[in-house]
Image (cartoon, grey):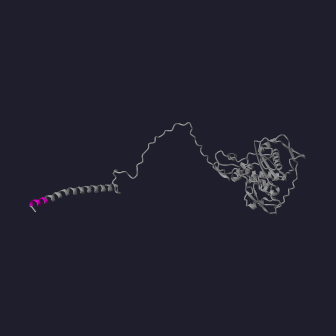
């Protein structure tokens, strides 16, 4: 081979190498770009992608639609004011406590709670302490008020032909006394006191339940010499009684007992003397007023200072022609066959604070006493003591 051809071959080989070099470099450059793009895409879309908002998020952002606020037009419909719900107050089914207020009395309390015509008696029945002091209540005192519809206890039926000594329960009613109860059951005051362990025979109250031994005695009316009766002159509600002297129409077949009257006169004046007071002078007009009332109570079967004609003690005294500046009347009733004599009447008056004060009233100067017995009345024997000052 010639030198010229050898040189041409070297030059041609060099040229070929020079042509392949740029092609390889371009291919590598394209490859790097493609790899770079792939890496960039993976980075931007992978779990560790940057927070650059180059791509849409997974959760599309909602399009906000603007809604205009409507202003309501005035209406002609008036605004309705709701009526408050009333609080229900249950009606008591049993007696309830009430605190006495300024100006209260039993009558006002009965009216306040609509207790009806028996309201005062029901209040007395439920409050023995108030009953004992004559119905007086004190401000701040707690008393029991009967529930609506409460009724007074009714009389206990008396079974017929019960064996002697059989015991029955009895509810005390207004106006009851142990003597009257004993009379109803043919019992005795002592037996009732013993059966019920009573410390004071007069200390019973309306509604109290007593155990009564029945048919212990067969009552026999005492033998009392009758005295002339009288009938009232028909001249009004305070008619003046006058001696009947055998009137054919007496108020009832009552009798009197002069021994009871004489004994009671002595007891009253001795008691006043013992307490440093002057004795009372007997007055026939006051005695006639007392007699009128005793007969009225016996014949009409009641025990009260108000007469069956609605007369008061002062009315009866005035009807006898006695002009009084002060009148005091005490009454007592108990069958004599059960111990209702003058001593029993006196002892009861002395034991009771108000009646004791009456007996020791320094303002009275004269008195009159009467007694009437009627077997068909509940209490049978009725005492009346009238004291007065001209």
Residue furthest to the left in view is 3
Residue 340 placed where, x, y %? Answer: 80, 55
Q: Is 205 in front, or is 273?
A: 205
- Is the residue 53 above or below the residue 236 in the image? below
Position of the N terminus by quadrant: bottom left
Quick check: 377 left or right of 69? right
Q: Is 204 in front, or is 153?
A: 153
Query: Which residue lies at the image location 79% right of the left edge and 42% below the top edge?
Result: 315
In which quadrant of the rendered view does residue 326 lie? top right
Membership of 6 in magenta stretch: yes
Residue 144 placed where, x, y %? Answer: 67, 52
Residue 299 placed where, x, y %? Answer: 83, 49
The number of callouts visible is 0
Position of the C terminus by quadrant: top right
> Magenta part of the protein: which range?
3-9
Residue 129 placed where, x, y %? Answer: 69, 53
Asked if one can make out residue 75 in the rendered structure from this viewpoint, the answer is yes
């Amino acid at each position: 081979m010639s030198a010229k051809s050898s040189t041409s071959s070297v030059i041609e080989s060099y040229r070929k190498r020079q042509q392949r070099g740029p092609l390889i470099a371009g291919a590598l450059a394209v490859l790097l770009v493609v790899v770079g793009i792939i890496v960039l895409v993976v980075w931007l879309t992978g779990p560790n992608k940057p927070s650059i908002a180059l791509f849409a998020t997974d959760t599309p952002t909602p399009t906000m639609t603007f809604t205009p606020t409507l202003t309501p037009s005035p209406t002609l419909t008036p605004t309705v004011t709701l009526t408050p719900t009333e609080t229900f107050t249950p009606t008591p089914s049993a007696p309830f406590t009430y605190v006495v207020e300024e100006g209260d009395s039993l009558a006002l309390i009965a009216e306040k709670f609509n207790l009806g015509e028996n309201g005062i008696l029901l209040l007395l029945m439920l409050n023995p302490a108030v009953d004992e002091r004559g119905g007086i209540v004190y401000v701040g005192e707690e008393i029991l008020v009967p529930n609506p519809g409460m009724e007074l206890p009714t009389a206990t039926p008396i079974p017929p032909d019960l064996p002697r000594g059989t015991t029955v329960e009895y509810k005390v009613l207004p106006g009851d006394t142990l003597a009257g109860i004993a009379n109803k059951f043919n019992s005795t005051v002592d037996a009732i006191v013993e059966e019920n362990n009573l410390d004071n025979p007069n200390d019973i109250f309306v509604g109290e339940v007593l155990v009564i031994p029945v048919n212990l005695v067969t009552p026999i009316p005492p033998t009392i010499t009758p005295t002339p009766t009288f009938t009232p002159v028909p001249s009004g509600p305070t008619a003046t009684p006058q001696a009947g002297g055998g009137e054919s129409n007496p108020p009832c077949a009552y009798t009197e007992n002069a021994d009871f009257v004489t004994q009671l006169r002595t007891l009253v004046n001795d008691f006043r003397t013992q307490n440093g007071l002057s004795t009372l002078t007997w007055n026939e007009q006051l005695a006639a007023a007392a007699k009128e009332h005793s007969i009225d109570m016996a014949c009409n079967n009641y025990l009260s200072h108000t007469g069956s004609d609605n007369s008061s003690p002062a009315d009866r005294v005035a009807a006898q022609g006695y002009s009084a500046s002060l009148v005091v009347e005490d009454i007592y009733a108990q069958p004599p066959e059960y111990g209702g004599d003058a001593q029993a009447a006196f002892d009861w008056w002395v034991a009771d604070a108000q009646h004791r004060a009456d007996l020791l009233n320094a303002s009275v100067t004269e008195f009159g006493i009467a007694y009437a017995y009627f077997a068909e009345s509940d209490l049978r024997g009725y005492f009346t003591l009238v004291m007065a000052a001209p």
